[in-house]
Amino acid sequence: MTRCAARLLTLLLCLSVVGTAHAQFGRQSALPTPAELDRFGLERAWWSQATLDSSTDKLLHLTADEELLYAQSRTGILTAFDAETGERLWSRLLGTPEAPSFPVSTNSDQLLLATGMNLFALDKFNGKLLWQLNLPTHPSTAPEVNDVQVYIGSLDGSAWAFDLANIRNLFQDRLLPDFSNATVAWRHRVDGPITSPPVAAGPRVNFASEDGSLYSVDLNDGDVHFQFETDGPIIAPIGRNQDALFIASDDVRFFCINQLDGKLRWTHVTGLPIRRQPQIVGQQVFIAPERGGMTALTTAEGRVMWKQIQATEFLAASAQSVFTSDDLGNLLILSRYDGAITGVLPLREMSVRVNNDRTDRVYLATSQGLIMCLRELGSDFPKYHKFPERQPMLPEFSDDQPESDADIPNEAQGEIPAEDIPAAF
């Protein structure tokens, strides 16, 4: 090797080391320090990096359930992490790079992804492809799945139900996509594009449309059980708890209806349209109208508990706090009881965020795929909100260990009137 070539190789090696160090520094610099988090009673549970195609790829969606966190890139790469440890479990490319895709949806063991004109089902724990289905029309929502069918909305106003057994059998026999039509259980068409991912509840499936109506149809044949009409298009996805549906209309009204018969329980007038999904945690529902801050309502009566004008997006909730974003991308920590701001963290670089109504964990990421999970100090085990029956059995503690909600303020302590606290958060 000549002296000139040796110098060039040395220079390239130095540049490589500097570049790696700079990338590592840039990755770490987006993360708050332990001291910054400790001021607000938080800690970093873990941080990791999603798999991206190249320096030009971007993180598109971040989704979580009780067990896993899912990162989707613009080029179609899907990465799954353990939601509690941050361990990267698997990564794979699905669909065509740059094809339009929706956030993934999951159940106890499957992950579903609609991208382009395709619907994929994976084993969510190992990423194995279970089946792939060609969709008859362009999807407009993420899918929903139960034990017998999968449901999805489309741009032409159709809500589709596909038979899972037929899909699996045809896929195993290598008869898809040629016999995709044989998987259709039913189709229900309305006047406008389907705007909310279908919600399967008991014997019915519910979905909303730009025509301003919510439809509740029989999951076996798609026949309408009831139709709830509003005076404006319904853009936001439907919210749901055990027995009620929460609907935000562009006519600046927010509705709670009985999911069995569609009867109106209460209405809240926002004065501004709601485009984000209402988030229900315990006996509170959180709504964020456009340019209208965030409001906490009781689920039973629709009574306003508080309004915080600086909050714009729900991220997660614990027994004491609500974690939100503001217009500048900061992480705001609010009191769950009166909406007062108790902390502000400047995390603007981490602009990709999960609206987590499942647990009390806060998940944030940069567009370059750096992901972080935050939790409250001492919160070693997540609190399950949406499906409390899935909460694992926790280790036994001594008798003097406080209950999870033991530190909720009460009237005797003089912190908050009893009538302002729902029966149970």
Image: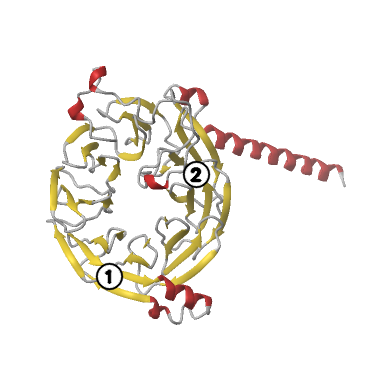
Asked if residue 179 lies left or right of residue 289, the reply is right
- Measuring 16% from the left and 37% from the top, which residue is drawn there? 303
Tell me if I can see residue 31 in this picture: no
- Measuring 49% from the left and 38% from the top, which residue is drawn there? 372
The crowding category of the residue bearing disc 2, from other C-alpha atoms within 10 Å (few below 14, some 14 to 19, many at least 20), is many
Asked if residue 407 lies left or right of residue 34, the reply is left
Tell me if I can see residue 70 in this picture: yes
Q: Nearer the viewer, mark 1 or mark 2?
A: 2
Q: Which residue is mark 2?
A: 83
Q: Secondary structure at mark 1?
A: loop
Asked if residue 90 lies left or right of residue 273, the reply is right
Quarter of the figure with the C terminus: top left
Residue type, numbered disc 1: Asp
Q: Is residue 164 above or below residue 294?
A: below
Q: Report which quarter residue 339 is drawn in.
A: top left
How far apart are the two marked residues, 1 and 2, measured between alpha carbons? Answer: 36 Å
Q: Report which quarter residue 337 is drawn in.
A: top left
Choose between 385 and 322: the one closer to the eye: 385
Q: Which residue is mark 1?
A: 156
> Measured from the top left, where is residue 414 in percent x and y?
23, 17
The crowding category of the residue bearing disc 1, from other C-alpha atoms within 10 Å (few below 14, some 14 to 19, many at least 20), is some
